[in-house]
Amino acid sequence: MISIINEDKYLWADVNLTEANLSNANEFKALLIDLLNQKQKSIVLNMTQVTYIDSSFLGALVAGLKHAISMQFDIILVGLQPDIHDLIKLIRLDKVFKIYNDNSQVQ
Amino acid sequence: MKNIISKQQFNFDNRTSSLTPLTQQVVNYLTGLLTPQQAASGILFKAKFIVTELLTNALKHSAVSNASLDIIITDTHLEIIKTDTGQPLPLINQTDLPVDVKTAISQDFMHRLYAMPLSNGAISFFCEETSFDTPDINQINEHFGLLIITKTADEFMYWYDEPVNVFCAKLVL
């Protein structure tokens, strides 16, 4: 579900899901929190493969972000499909997540 | 009296595996009916997310084996209506909520969600964006379903016609 691609000051990871929904939200949240606990650094999530998302998965992302921030780290979203980016902006989660078009824009 | 141009009912078997295919079926159905201008105006995007969240709501809360989704196009609106025979929304039993008055039912630093009981027994939902200086992630609600539907739809109502729950989202065409 989450594949680690690279590791430097960030953990760079791909989300290997096309449908990010109720069926995988809890497992994703657990994996994300585990990664934060194990790697002790901010995570850049490449969401390019995700074409469908629901409120459950958004809740999992928010839960992950809360855990990251409590550890003084971050979760950064990259490569959001336009519909999904629009949904995230609609519910104003772009006010709390850093979002970039691709990995090269992450500082 | 509304003029119905097209109407189609879809059956949802309350399986997670059916969520995406059924949502896509609805999107395909609408794509064939909407004008290019309507499709380009964002109606399809909104319909897709309303359907997604209504079906997710059915999965999470209805605890019954199926739900129905009615897609109705009139000359002025797209109506997305989900019905099921699960437990009613707890709000319906809150008899102390004043009729025709918006009451806040949930809030975080970005949104305030309101319910307004109507004299006909239905509940209408509204959302306001709230201003803030510094975002506080710990104040964010992790449950977005009702928020997504309320913000996306031009009108969103619920009513309970025992034993049937009806969720009705309308988009102006």
Image: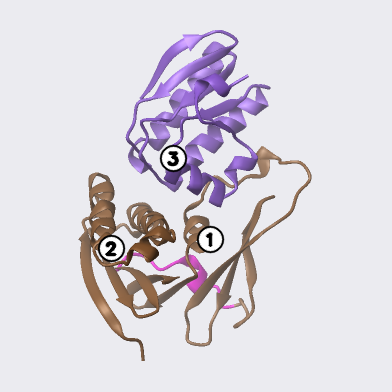
The residue to which callout 3 is attached is: A57
Quadrant in which the C terminus of chain B is drawn: bottom left
Q: Is mark 2 on a helix, strand or loop?
A: helix
The residue to which callout 2 is attached is: B30
Q: What element carries label 3?
A: helix
Residue shown at 46% from the left, 35% from the top: A80
The chain whose colour is brown is B
Residue shown at 35% from the left, 26% from the top: A16
Residue shown at 40% from the left, 79% from the top: B76
In this rendering, the label closer to the viewer, 1 or 3: 1
Q: Are marks 3 and 2 in contact (CB under 8 Å)?
A: no
A18 and B88: which one is in front?
A18
| Three-letter code, disc 1 | Lys
Between marks 1 and 3, how big is the CA–CA gap?
18 Å
Same-chain check, marks 1 and 3: no
The chain under label 1 reads B
Q: Do the residues labelled 1 and 2 touch (CB within 8 Å)?
A: no
Q: Position of residue A88 (x, y in %)?
A: 52, 45
The crowd level at tag 1 (other Cα within 10 Å; few <14, some 14-19, many 20+) is: many
In this rendering, the label closer to the viewer, 1 or 2: 2
Magenta segment range?
B84-95
Same-chain check, marks 3 and 2: no
Residue shown at 60% from the left, 35% from the top: A97
In this rendering, the label closer to the viewer, 3 or 2: 2
